[in-house]
Image (cartoon, rainbow, N blue to C red):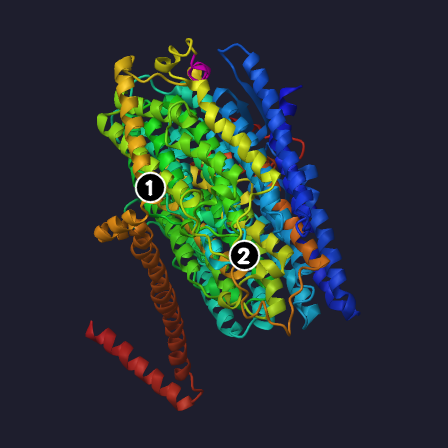
């Protein structure tokens, strides 16, 4: 089929779904609304497959399908088309978005079944897919920005979906505004790049990237990429703008799976990979990215240990895993970042949907302290969740293992990396194994702490089938990117992933091949520590549940600090938001009302005063006038004489 | 004759309404007439040449020979969209005030049409005195609109409105007269024609305030800055808006504020190029301060109408910033933002009017949970909110993006500060949206004695054209920008010796095609 038609179907099918469900917003039938929405995304998925099949059949060099529909914005030299491109990078994204998206839509039919606003829910979900596709397919930063803000908007709508709850509405607002801070930086990044290179088109920008790295901090390239990275920290929940993501869990759980785990939050990583020839020439930016990524990976993981809400644990875990992706990007491992993006999309979507299944089966209970032993009530949810757990803690041969260890290898060996970054990554991996095992133990294993009036039950097939598919992907998806060091022991299995992305990824300057012994040692370290950590967590939370409480008690100040998420929200409120509100109230009161207005009326009074003085002179009294004349004559005469 | 008909038809309509015998059909008549006016204004496109830089559809007759005052009208890419904005908004305003204006219906519609003539005349007049007449004429119906159909503190508001605008206008009149003498000195024949003004070489000395061009520049700039309104002469606006009836607010925000920014484009920048250039930093500063100041103050307003009024201060700050960037992005974005603001803020005032008709309150704290009760109203309000906070694919984004891009090119420091408006805009709008539409139902919303009804067909008909414009202008900005491109490019490239000519119908505009670089 014609490429522009396919592209149009790919992008517009979810939009049509949005319009249909949007028009039926008052309808309550979840099955009808859900079917419309799911079919819409499935159509997109099929178009995406057809496009990618065509893409694969093209020769490796010049492998891209580009379609431009119309000229969108143009003034003077600034011209941006509504142009979209499928290439090696966006192909991965569209398959993940529409594929995982279809599964999550399917799951939602079961999950949102008895919600009154179900048609509206599916309308928003479709609108999200539409915007996400704009984001990844856009052939320029500006078209990407359309989707970039669009997904933020849908995220806002879906987080605050149950808007009668003030807290949930506030969480939506927080997400949008935090994202907007990043978006403002994104805009500045676009301005810098446009003024410097005269274009916002990705392929043109990448072609114009200098061949010599820029070493200053205030050079256009460093400044532009840094601004874009700040934009990425908003969307992808990195320090310091990560604060919205944990709150975003107020939305329906499938939304957390789709938007806040698998797709939207990875947009920042994707954007940087898209512009990798530009970023790699700005080593200062790369250093900042790597440090922020590593710091976020560790920081969020520590918070994850102390959370008791099943979704909050997963949320901090997502922040932490996104940190890994930025660490990868920052050390120049763009392929590894994309790889982890994909595997994470599978296993984290799986675990979020799994938590949705748990919450559904527990009748809206989210506190893991009130769970335990759910294994026997929810066998499918349990077993699929186990697959996700094994993947995220990096069990050898599971998907997360390949992607995470590739990142760690690069962090250690890349000229842009350092042993410190690697160590941070390993610490993060160890913490991840701990809190994920804790989550498993408290939710599924050990003794049941479920209150007697709750009767947990397994979810229906429409919810478990997506779980099973995602579990399979979580286990095996890593096999398309097996590193050579392992591949050579598996019948010389090639690294398909690296091969596929190779033409799109800039080589790291000064890269030398990593020797196999080092690679084995690094792998051994991270796997070994993660295993130990998982075993300790299992001992703590299944065998002797009193131990962690005692430990928490003995280091109370530290525990409180972490349990309260390092008081970052409080600091933002006390240090920025409240002062800003007070400043606004004071400027309004003192400047507008009490200064400018007073001045105006003072000026008015002055004029009036002068008027009334002149009026008082004109009395109509002849004698008075005669006197004025007399005085006037005397004054005039004396003036003449005095000269 | 097209421009004359466009300007003076509404005046004729006002007369017709004044003598119309049946009180109960005045609204229908007024709506019909305003639609006729809109259709007539569309006929401009039949004759308008988008590639020409000069004045088109010119009508020019000597009016007062001794002073060189002419009946002189013309249109170009700068005024074109402002004229259409005016004729587009008028029927919408009349339909929106269908039930909110209940007293002196005849007088109200007469005011409305006189106001329309005054505004259109302001955009089309090319003779300084002729322009000044329309400029001042627009004050009178507005004064009555606020003073008669306004709220409780309407007298205070009208007085404040008058003091401010008159103070500015008087200085401008002095400057106009002075410039007429300058034309006499230069050519021997006194003229008030704007085209003759453009040809003047007014001496400019940098570094001092007391240079002739600088003084004239500030006389004009102050009048326009008050109208915009720019910080710190903005404080008349919130009061005027709060006290004005809905249609008054819509006209004020939708069109009258643009008379100020249009004044900068048509008068200040081309007439006083050196002074504009020299003082650009001041106006960019004023614009930037306005963006941030307006947004901050909007954030803490307890009255939703006042919030939108302060948001206007913020949005108009963007326009000023863009115009004084002196490049195609800033100017084009600025012009575009004038239209956007007319649509989005106009629609916001209409929406606020609709809810006020139902509850008789605009206090944010008394609302809450409205989304559950009035879903259709909520959808419209949300779409307009998106336009106001400049989400891509809505009109607001195009304008804001180009303004900020132009500002960055001209002076990145201002762009760094101005971009904070992108965040603050979302803060005050979404925070308000949350408190009004989300959360538990507020006292006005759950009041069982006065159950709220969602929008009726008439109200939807009022809002649909606005929403169409939001997306049309957001998705296909070139449909609009292409008509203004030639005029803006000419202004940007030739502002130091701006020499607008009259395009003869059918003739190709050769001189300026060469003048451009």
Q: Tell which of A556 and B76 is nearer to you.
A: A556
- Asked if marks 1 and 2 touch (Cβ < 8 Å), the reply is no
Residue A402 occupies quadrant? top left
Q: Mark 1 lies on which chain?
A: A
Q: Where is residue A349 in the image (x, y as percent from the top left)?
A: 49, 36
* A496 drawn magenta: yes
Q: Which chain carries label 2?
A: B
Q: Tell which of A446 and A173 is nearer to you.
A: A446
- Up-down: is B103 above or below A431? below
Q: Where is residue A450 in the image (x, y as percent from the top left)?
A: 46, 52
Q: Give the range drawn in magenta.
A: A494-500
B29 with respect to A412 (left or right): right
Secondary structure under the numbered disc 1 in the rendered image? helix
Q: Tell which of A132 and A466 is nearer to you.
A: A466
> Do we see residue B504 in this rendering?
no
- State the residue lying farthest toward the right: B22
At x 77% / y 69%, what residue is drawn? B24
Q: Position of residue A405 (x, y in %)?
A: 34, 24
Secondary structure under the numbered disc 2 in the rendered image? helix
- Up-down: is A165 above or below A261? below
At x 47% / y 41%, what residue is drawn? A375
At x 29% / y 38%, what residue is drawn? A536
Number of marks in picture: 2
Within 10 Å of the Cα at label 2, are there few (<14), some (14-19), or many (20+) other Cα atoms? many
* Label disc, if present, on residue A300 of the rendered structure: 1
Q: Where is residue A183 in the image (x, y as percent from the top left)?
A: 42, 40
A503 with respect to B251 (left or right): left
Residue picked out by circle 2: B253
């Amino acid at each position: 089929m014609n490429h522009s038609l396919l592209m149009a179907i790919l992008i517009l099918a979810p939009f049509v779904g949005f319009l249909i469900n949007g028009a039926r917003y008052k309808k309550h039938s979840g099955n009808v609304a859900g079917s419309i929405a799911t079919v819409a995304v499935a159509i997109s998925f099929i178009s995406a497959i057809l496009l990618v099949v065509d893409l694969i059949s093209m020769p490796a060099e010049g492998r891209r399908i580009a379609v431009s529909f119309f000229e969108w914005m143009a003034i003077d030299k600034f011209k941006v088309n509504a142009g979209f491109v499928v290439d090696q990078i966006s192909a991965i994204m569209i398959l993940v978005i529409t594929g995982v998206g279809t599964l999550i839509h399917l799951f939602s039919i079961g999950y949102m079944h008895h919600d009154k606003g179900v048609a509206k829910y599916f309308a928003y979900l479709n609108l999200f897919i539409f915007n996400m596709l704009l984001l990844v397919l856009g052939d320029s930063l500006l078209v990407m920005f359309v989707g970039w803000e669009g997904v933020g908007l849908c995220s806002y709508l879906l987080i605050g979906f149950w808007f009668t709850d003030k807290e949930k509405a506030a969480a939506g607002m927080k997400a949008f505004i935090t994202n907007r801070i990043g978006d403002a930086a994104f805009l500045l990044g676009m301005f810098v790049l446009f003024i410097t290179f005269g274009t916002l088109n990705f392929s043109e920008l990448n072609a114009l990237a200098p061949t010599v790295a820029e070493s200053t901090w205030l050079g256009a390239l460093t400044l532009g990429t840094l601004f874009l990275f700040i934009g990425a920290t908003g969307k992808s929940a990195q320090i310091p703008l990560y604060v919205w993501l944990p709150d975003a869990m107020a939305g329906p759980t499938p939304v957390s799976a789709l938007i806040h785990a698998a797709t939207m939050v990875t947009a920042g990583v994707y954007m940087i990979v898209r512009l990798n020839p530009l970023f790699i020439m700005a080593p200062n930016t790369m250093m900042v990215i790597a440090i922020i990524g590593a710091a976020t990976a560790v920081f969020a993981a520590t918070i994850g240990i102390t959370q008791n809400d099943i979704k909050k644990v997963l949320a901090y875990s997502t922040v932490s895993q996104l940190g890994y992706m930025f660490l990868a990007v920052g050390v120049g491992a763009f392929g590894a970042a994309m790889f982890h993006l994909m595997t994470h999309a599978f296993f984290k979507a799986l675990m979020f949907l799994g938590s949705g299944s748990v919450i559904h089966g527990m009748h809206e209970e989210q506190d893991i302290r009130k769970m335990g032993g759910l294994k026997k009530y929810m066998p499918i949810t349990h077993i699929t969740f186990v697959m996700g757990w094994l993947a995220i803690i990096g069990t050898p041969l599971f998907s997360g293992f390949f992607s995470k260890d590739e990142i760690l290898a690069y962090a250690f060996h890349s000229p842009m990396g350092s042993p410190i970054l690697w160590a941070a990554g390993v610490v993060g991996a160890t913490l991840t194994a701990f809190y994920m095992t804790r989550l498993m133990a408290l939710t599924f294993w050990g003794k049941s702490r479920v209150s007697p009036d709750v009767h947990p039950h397994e979810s229906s097939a429409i919810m478990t089938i997506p779980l099973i598919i995602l579990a399979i992907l979580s286990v095996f998806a890593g096999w398309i990117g097996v590193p050579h060091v392992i591949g050579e022991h598996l019948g010389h299995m090639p690294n398909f992933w690296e091969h596929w992305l190779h033409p799109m990824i800039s080589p790291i300057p000064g890269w030398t091949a990593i020797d196999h012994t080092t690679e084995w040692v690094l792998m051994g370290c991270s796997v070994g520590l993660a295993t130990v950590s998982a075993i300790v967590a299992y001992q703590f939370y299944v065998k002797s549940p009193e131990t962690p409480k005692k430990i928490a008690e003995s280091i109370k100040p530290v525990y409180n600090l972490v349990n309260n998420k390092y008081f970052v929200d409080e600091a933002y409120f006390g240090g920025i938001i409240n002062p800003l509100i007070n400043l606004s109230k004071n400027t309004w009161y003192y400047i507008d009302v009490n200064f400018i207005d007073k001045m105006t009326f003072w000026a008015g009074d002055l004029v009036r005063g002068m008027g009334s003085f002149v009026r008082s002179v004109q009395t109509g009294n002849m004698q008075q006038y005669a006197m004025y004349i007399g005085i006037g004559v005397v004054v005039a005469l004396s003036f003449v004489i005095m000269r | 004759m097209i421009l004359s008909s466009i300007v003076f038809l509404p005046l004729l309509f006002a007369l017709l309404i004044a003598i119309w015998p049946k009180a109960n059909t005045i609204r229908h008549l007024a709506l019909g007439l305003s639609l006729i006016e809109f259709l007539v204004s569309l006929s401009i496109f039949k004759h308008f040449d988008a590639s020409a830089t000069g004045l088109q559809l010119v009508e020019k007759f000597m009016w007062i020979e001794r002073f060189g005052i002419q009946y002189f009208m013309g249109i170009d890419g700068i005024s074109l969209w402002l004229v259409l904005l005016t004729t587009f908004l008028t029927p919408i305003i009349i339909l929106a005030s269908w039930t909110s204006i209940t007293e002196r219906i005849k007088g109200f519609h007469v005011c409305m049409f006189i106001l329309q003539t005054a505004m259109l005349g302001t955009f089309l007049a090319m003779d300084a005195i002729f322009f000044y007449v329309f400029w001042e004429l627009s004050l009178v119906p507005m004064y009555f609109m606020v003073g008669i159909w306004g709220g409780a503190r309407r007298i205070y508001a009208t007085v404040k409105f008058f003091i401010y605008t008159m103070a500015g206008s008087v200085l401008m009149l002095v400057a106009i007269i002075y410039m007429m003498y300058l034309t006499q000195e230069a050519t021997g024949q006194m003229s008030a024609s704007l085209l003759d003004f453009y040809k003047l070489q007014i001496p400019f000395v940098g570094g001092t305030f007391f240079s002739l061009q600088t003084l004239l520049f500030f006389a004009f700039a102050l009048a326009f800055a008050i109208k915009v309104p720019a910080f710190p002469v903005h404080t008349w606006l919130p009061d005027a808006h709060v006290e004005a009836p809905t249609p008054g607010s819509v006209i004020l925000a939708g069109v009258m504020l643009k008379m100020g920014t249009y004044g900068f484009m048509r008068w200040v920048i081309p007439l006083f190029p050196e002074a504009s250039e020299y003082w650009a930093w001041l106006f960019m500063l004023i614009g930037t301060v306005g963006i941030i100041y307006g947004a901050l103050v909007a954030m803490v307003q307890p009255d939703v109408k006042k919030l939108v009024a302060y948001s206007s201060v913020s949005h108009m700050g963007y326009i000023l910033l863009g115009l004084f960037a002196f490049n195609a992005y800033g100017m084009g974005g600025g012009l575009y933002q004038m239209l956007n603001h007319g649509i989005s803020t106009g629609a916001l005032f209409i929406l606020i009017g609709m809810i006020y008709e139902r509850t008789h309150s605009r206090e944010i704290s008394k609302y809450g949970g409205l989304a559950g009760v009035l879903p259709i109203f909520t959808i419209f309000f949300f779409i307009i909110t998106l336009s106001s906070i400049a989400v891509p694919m809505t009109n607001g984004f195009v304008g804001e993006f180009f303004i900020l891009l132009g500002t960055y090119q001209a002076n990145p420091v201002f762009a760094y500060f101005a971009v904070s408006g992108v965040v603050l805009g979302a803060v005050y709008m979404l925070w308000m949206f949350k408190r009004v539409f989300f959360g538990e139902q507020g006292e006005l919303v759950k009041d069982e004695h006065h159950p709220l009804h969602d929008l009726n067909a008439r109200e939807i008909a009022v809002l649909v054209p606005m929403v169409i414009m939001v997306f049309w202008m957001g998705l296909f900005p070139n449909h609009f920008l292409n008509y203004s491109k030639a005029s803006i490019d000419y202004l940007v490239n030739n502002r130091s010796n701006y020499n607008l000519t009259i395009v003869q119908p059918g003739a190709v505009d050769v001189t300026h095609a060469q003048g451009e670089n």
